[in-house]
Structure formats: C-alpha cells, structure tokens
Amino acid sequence: MRVIRVSSVDFVRFTWLNKKEDQEIEEEEDDDDDDDDEEEEDVSYDDIPPIQPVEDGERYYTNPTIWIGVLPETLTGAVARELSKDIHAFLDSLQVQNVDIAYRESVCKTLPGHDPALFSPVEDGDPLKNVIDNVSVSLSLPIAGRKTTMQGTLGPYFRVGDKLYAITVRHNVFLRDGDNELYSPSSESAPKKEVLVMGAPAFTNYLASIQALIGMHIDSVESLEKKINTLRTRVQDGINVQESQTKLDENEAELAKTRTKIDSLKKFFVDIKKSWSKPKDRVIGFVRWAPPIGAGVAPHRYTRDLCVIELYKDKFKHMIGNVLSLGPELSRSKLKALMYERNDIPSEFKYPDDGLLTLRGMLTAYQVNNPNTLNLQGDRIHRVLKRGFTTNTTVGTLTRFMSFVRKYFTTGNVESLEVPILSHEHDSGTFSKGGDSGSLIVSALGEFVALLTGGTSKGTDGSDITFATLFEWVWELVKEEFPGANLYFDDLKEFLADVA
C-alpha cells in the first residue's frame, strides 16, 4: 500500500500562449491597390462592429488535470508514476478519458499577517484616495487583536436591531495553538477580547507610507517648478509662444494641484499620528462569538473559521453599509479588463463612478458550480475580486470545482472542501497573501461569494491557490447564532441616529 501525504486535490486546466516565431510578412492583403479608383464610403464609429482582441500566438490548453498537492519531500517520482496508473485505471472504469495527472508540493495554511471615528471613503481624484482605506468605513479594514500579533482583514458588516457587527476569521484574533474552544462571553462584565485597526507594525508602516507619498509629491513639485521656469523663459523670449504658453498653463495647474495634495496629506498625517497612535484609540470593537475552527464540518464538509466582532457604533458613524472600495492601485480600465475581457457581450461588471462597489445578493453553491459567463476563449468562469490588507484589490478566477484539502497535525489529519480561487491568467500577481484572511470575495455584480480563509504555497508568502468558505454557509451559521441578522442597511440615518 502506497502512503503519500496529500494536502489538496483540484480539478483544473492549464493554458499558456505559444508566441509565434519572428518572420517577415510576405504581403499585406489590406494594401491591395486594385480598388483605389473606387470611392470609399464614409463610415462612422457606430457602424463598425466590435473588434475582438487577438493574441499574438497560439494558445495551448492542457487536458483537464487532476492537480494533486503533496507535502514537501513526501513523494518520489516512482510513487507518483504508480499512483497515476491507479488513478487512470479508476478513470477508465468510469469511461473517462483524456484527463492528466499532475503533482506539486504544497502546504495548506491559513493566511495571518507576519508578525477617533473612522473616515468616510473618498472618491477618485481626492488627495487622500491613496491612503484613506486603512482608516475608512469601507470594507476590508486591516485588523489585529489588541493582545495578539496576527494581522488580518475585516469582512462584511451586519446588524441586529441597533447593534453593529462584522465577520472575520477566527485565526486573525485567536492564536493557532490556543485551546480552539467556543468563545462566547456569557456576561457584559467579562473581560473583552478587543480588536483594533492595524497592529503596531502595520500602523507604523502606514504612517511611513503616507510620508513616502508626501515625499514623492515634493519631488514632483521640484520637477514642475523647473519646467515652469523653462517655459516662462521661452514665452518671454518669443520661442514657440503659443505651444509654450499652453504647456506653461498646464504645468502651473498641475503644480497647484500637487501642492494642494501635499497640504492635505500633511494635515491628514498629523491628525492620524496624533489621534490614532495609541492602541486604545484604534480599538473598534470586541469578539462577541467565535466557534471552534473546524475542517470538514457537516453537512457540506466546509471549513469553519469564523469570528464575529461587535463593533463600537460611534467609531462607524460615517459608515455607508457593505460597500467595497476598489482602491487606487488598479486603474478603471485595468480592473474592467481583468474582470471581463470580451467586448461582444456587455459586461456584468460596472465600475462605479465613485470607485465604491455596493454589495447586494449572494452567490449560491449552485451558481458557483454553474457559471453563466464566458471568458475570451469561451470557457465558463466566474471572475471575482477582493480587497485585503496585504495585496489590496486583486481579481481571480473562481473555478467550478471544489478543492479537496488535507491538513496534517500531530493529533491526526483533517480534510475539508474549499472554494478555490486561482490567480488571473493575465495578471502575474497572486490573489492573496498573509494578512488577507477574513477578506470578503465578491462577484462582478457585487454579490457575496466567500470568506477568505487560507491557501496553498511552499516557500513564498503568496498562495498558488486561495481557499475560502462559501459565504452562503457562513451566513447560515451567523444567523443561527444571531437571529434577525441583516447584511443590508437600507435606512442608515435611522440606524446611526444614536451616534449621529
């Protein structure tokens, strides 16, 4: 009997682009001069059909592949060959052909980080756009336990009556080698397990990032001032006066905008350092309920890694509900291209004018398994996105097939089914890293999809596959514990009246 230490099993298909060899073009068909004498018809933009983007080469697709993750240094080539024979024999008995078997070393792990009222979100173009999210009421706040070092991400908000709560994963605020017992304080007088925005290292790095941005703008001011002096001299000397004056006006306007940004950022930095530096000033709530972390939990065999935070409403008096900031890192055009490559069919994803995606609805297990959108190659997929503490806004591919995951402990092995998210094939970055756990994964329509819990990797802090728990089930667990729980805030003015 062969014994291997499997960590995950996924059903995938690999693809890559084989570039064409460099060669001369013998003849350009469009340069044919035979019809030069014919009068060309006037054509408007609206008369031209959508042009599909093309890839410069031939895209290769592997067969559907059973991708087996094994613990490092636990599988030999000989055993892999024998195991593949057994799997193919089983597939043959089912009359399933043309399926490949592949192996990789991987370790399934959770994604903790390495070791005043929150602000309203701001719109694109605001001087604070690049720095506000860490202290804003939009989703994906960076959080840490007050007495623990792990850094994670806060998930969606919900309400029960006039109380405000949020969901994250348990391992963000509880030590992994702790007792893993149900945490549910029985009285208000019990000591609170407090949660704050940004642990100490994260807060220090946040301040440093604001200073770095200010420094970048100061460098821009120096460059603009030199350009302006040069252009003024040209205008005075009568050199290309019209062009020089136009460029002078543009650079003077840009200089004024940059100075405004610097002033706003300096004021913001002083405010944050003065009002948020002490840990007690960054406390936003406390753990109200955290069931034990479980793998293969009945009836679906999902992972249960869940924690509910009761939030201090006065910290969230500017809240706008479950709204995801798309952040400044990806341009509007880049994010739209990642979410939807086709232009012959209208995209489900509509980039909000203010850069804030309002969430509504929930993707069911059936919808996950039966996507109704196609990528450029005609494959049925779901594009999903998330915003996390470490990797900010990323776009990935939600597969139709659940991942089988096995984790190894000294006390025994545990197995579970996970919602897998693959990195985008047109983006070299990973979908998640340590510190992103607890992030809410959403669909192109702004539907709740899954709660990010971990991933597989070996030797890096990024995940080759991100794992999450279907939010439909997470929400069932929350509603059992919090009757009347509601994800929507249709009358925020009334809900926040007691802290207005």
Image: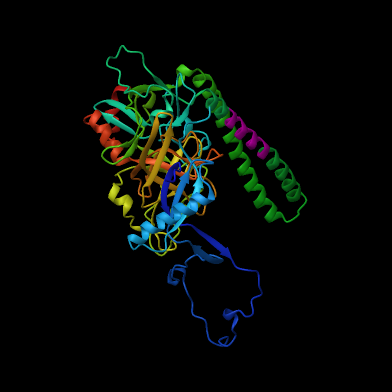
Residue 279 picture location, percent across and down? 48, 18
Residue 288 visible in the picture = yes
Q: Range of the magenta residues?
A: 208-220
Is residue 13 or residue 427 the one in the foreground?
A: 13
Q: Nearer the viewer, residue 317 or 62?
A: 62
Residue positioned 57% across, 31% down in the render: 210
Q: Position of residue 367 (x, y in %)?
A: 30, 51
Quadrant location of residue 253? top right
Q: Nearer the viewer, residue 414 or 51?
A: 414
Within the magenta stretch, is there residue 209? yes
Q: Nearer the viewer, residue 488 or 385?
A: 385
Q: In the rendered view, would you say 79 is above or below 378?
A: above
What residue is shown at x 52% (from left), y 81% (from top)?
Answer: 40
Q: Is residue 491 above or below residue 379?
A: above
Q: Main secondary structure of the magenta part?
A: helix
- Is 104 magenta? The answer is no
48 relative position to 400: left or right: right
Residue furthest top as drawn: 189
Question: Where is residue 163, by image quadrant?
Answer: top left
